[in-house]
Amino acid sequence: MFSSGCILLFTTFAFLSTAYRYDPAYEDYNLNQNKTAIDPLDYSGEWTGHDYTTSPSNWRFPFYTLFLDRFVNGDPTNDNSNGTAFEHDLNSNQMRHGGDLQGLVDTLDYIKGMGVKVCVALQEIVRTDTDQSQGLYIAGSPFINQPWGYDSYSPLDLSILDPHFGHIAMWRTAIDEIHSRGMYVVLDNTFATMGDLIGFEGYLNTTTPFSLKEHKVQWKSDRHYWDFDYGNTYNKACDYPAFWNETGYPVDKYVTEQMNGCYDSDFDQYGDTEAFGVFPDWRRELSKFASVQDRLREWHPSVREKIENFYCMAIAQLDVDGFRYDKATQSTVEAMGYMNAAMRTCARRYGKENFFLPGEITGGNDFASVFLGRGRQPDQLPENVTQAVSLSNNSADSYFIRDLGYEGLDSGAFHYTTYRSLTRFLGMDGNLEVSSDR
């Protein structure tokens, strides 16, 4: 469906910069309803005539997690939406199986019934209110992905919904059905990573060495991003964010002294770093993820503001209740604080006073503490137990890294320290070890 035309395939930057962004042919999937907008900051759209669902006062309740493609195929007509070879193959664990929103709606009573009955003991332990709420976390980005990206973690356009799952009306039907059952829905937010459309010059078929001087890049094919461009003009001055290492303290001075410039790009062009292993986390915050996902320069305000507008449109158009950040600690924490402030401000416009923003934590606990709430370093511990138990988000600034209102994650949603503890306890093999893990 989106293999050509106004959505993805353009070959010159001049055309991209002056293109007529809205195309009524894709109205059913395009969250942007501003027909005259060209700049992404002018994109807008709302669910008109809709009563938005307010946030729960307490998010401590059971969550059910699912990948739409691997769930229930309620509408087989969208299985081959891209029209590509081997796009849909039930005999492969690498291709799409066809699950979609219609299949989710058809199964909501099963999910609701299972959650209340099986998890009632957990509810009694952790909940402070009396309702029987549940959360539904739909894993993977809802936006259009690369044709064979069934897990949906490689979005190509943050304003176009993936037709494999359903159009805007189907999303709204599904979310209305979820809310009508006393359930809340959290979507994935990839924040700093996109698809795999950009290649490093000289390293198109091999791993690209990491370099703080960055590499020049090029498009891998005639498929380009609409709203983000790369740049190969080097600026000697570049305003870098703060970085922390695995100990929970800022990175050493010898590292920051090398951060003297960057390309005029919407993307980080520093090369590749393995997703796990012995490399420092600050490198992962700048590298192309696992060599397969382009990393947005989300720490640059002009890039972050576009991302903020895209995800605010998702709140306004779909009435979602929260975002779970994928690879949360592999993005820069200052940018996440600004992003979260924008998301909470946007959500409040629609009556959501407690918008939920958890995230995936891949590092150890010392590093994770930098990303949770206002952020804490090991030298910011309270002096005694009494102070510790009375500490709140409004406590003295000396206990935190960031200012009030620019919090990071509300909680961990897949904390790898817990995962690694379970694998060790069960005697399982794994390659996800990190330093300072406890």
Image (cartoon, rainbow, N blue to C red):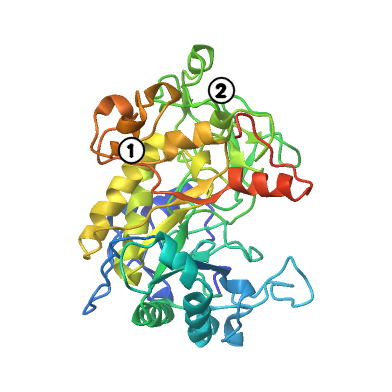
Residue bearing mark 1: 389
Helix, strand or loop under label 2: loop
Quadrant in which the C terminus is drawn: top right
Residue bearing mark 2: 213
- Residue located 75% across and 45% down the image: 430
- Residue located 32% across and 62% down the image: 128
Relative horizontal placement of residue 48, taking residue 173 as reference (left or right): left
Q: Earlier in the sequence, mark 1 or mark 2?
A: 2
Which residue is more in the foreground, 93 or 329? 329
Q: Mark 2 is on which residue type? A: Lys
Quadrant in which the N terminus is drawn: bottom right
Which residue is more in the foreground, 97 or 321? 321
- How packed mark 2 is, by other alpha carbons closer than 10 Å (few <14, some 14-19, many 20 or more), is some
Q: Is residue 20 visible?
A: no
Residue 204 in percent (x, y) is at 71, 41
Residue 428 in percent (x, y) is at 78, 49
Which residue is more in the foreground, 143 or 181? 181
Helix, strand or loop under label 1: helix
Relative horizontal placement of residue 74, taking residue 300 as reference (left or right): right
